[in-house]
Image (tube, helix red, strand yellow):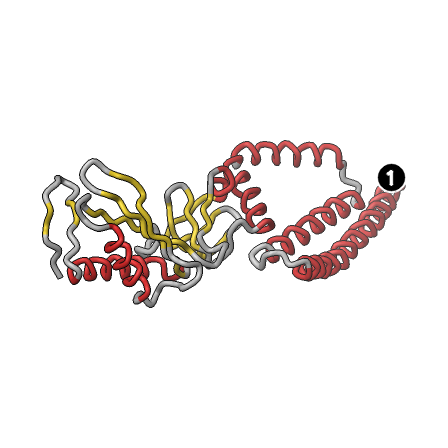
Amino acid sequence: MESFNIDMQQLTHDAIQYGTKLAIALLVLFIGFKLANRVARMAKKAMERLGLSENLLPFIGSLVGISLKVLLLLSAAAIMGLEMSSFVAILAAAGFAVGLALQGSLSNFAAGILILVFRPYKVGDWIEVEDRFGKVEEIQIFNTIIVTPGMKTLIIPNSHSINNIVTNYSSKGVVRLEIRVTMPYSESYPKVEQAIRKTLQSCHKLLEQPEPEVGIETYDSHNIVIVVRPYALPDDYWEATFEVNRKIKTTFHQCNIQIAYSEGIELGEIGD
């Protein structure tokens, strides 16, 4: 009976001791989680005042909140008297294994952070990455979503944008068209140039400034290659290109300007 009383006393003592620790740990978690959420919101607002990308703000808030909550859980475990060294070792080993398994995703993750912070391009820009041309629809943590002029959605891993050359057609606010026209050696170049420049003035999708460039690019084996470089807004790129090509062809027909066909040196009439 005396042994039973001693065991009950010990059990009561242990229950009170661990119950107190559990209560303190739960209180720390309750108060700490509220403070962590508030700190995360404050960090998000601070980053917003610094002018960081809107796409990055939710991620920063979540990252700060999760980090603080993990620290709170570790603190609560320490209050409960759990051995932290083995727990941290297991956590580190698990993190290392996950890192090896997701190293490709982690590189895309890091690249996404760099894109959102340094902004080589932003949502709405026309860009070209690895010969893929389109308009940026969304910048995610792991991928960049672009939509091509043919309405195809391309999902490009962010590491490709960081490790390769990215052409941003929207960074200057205008984009230059590259249109090539051929003419035979027997044709008058001043006549052709004047006709092209007059045609460009009638194209509504083109900009007056910067002024368009028209000149002889090269002398081919059977014809002269003329390059036409007008400027347009990035969103008008394809409409302007189609308009210029269509009107140049119409002008050549009206002015009876001949061209050399690419498959030979035969001169042909230009239809309507």
The kind of residue tagged 1 is Ser
Query: If the image is split into quadrants, where does the C terminus sit?
Result: bottom left
Query: If the image is split into quadrants, where does the N terminus sit?
Result: top right
Q: Residue at x 44, y 62 (%)?
A: 209
Q: Nearer the viewer, residue 120 or 82?
A: 120
Number of on-image labels? 1
Q: Position of residue 220 (x, y in %)?
A: 23, 38
Q: Position of residue 123 (x, y in %)?
A: 49, 57
Reply above or below: 57 against 227: below
Q: Residue at x 19, y 43 (%)?
A: 185
Could you say whether the residue bearing mark 1 is in a helix, strand or loop?
Answer: helix
Q: Nearer the viewer, residue 2 or 123?
A: 123
Residue 226 left/right relative to 255: right
Q: Nearer the viewer, residue 265 or 77?
A: 265
Q: Position of residue 39 (x, y in %)?
A: 73, 58
Query: Badge 1 is on which residue?
Result: 3
Q: Residue at x 88, y 42 (%)?
A: 6
Q: Residues within 10 Å of mark 1 (few under 14, many from 20)?
A: few
Q: Residue at x 78, y 43 (%)?
A: 78
Q: Nearer the viewer, residue 157 or 262?
A: 262
Reply above or below: 189 against 83: below
Q: Position of residue 148 (x, y in %)?
A: 35, 53
Residue 264 left/right relative to 129: left
Residue 24 left/right relative to 37: right
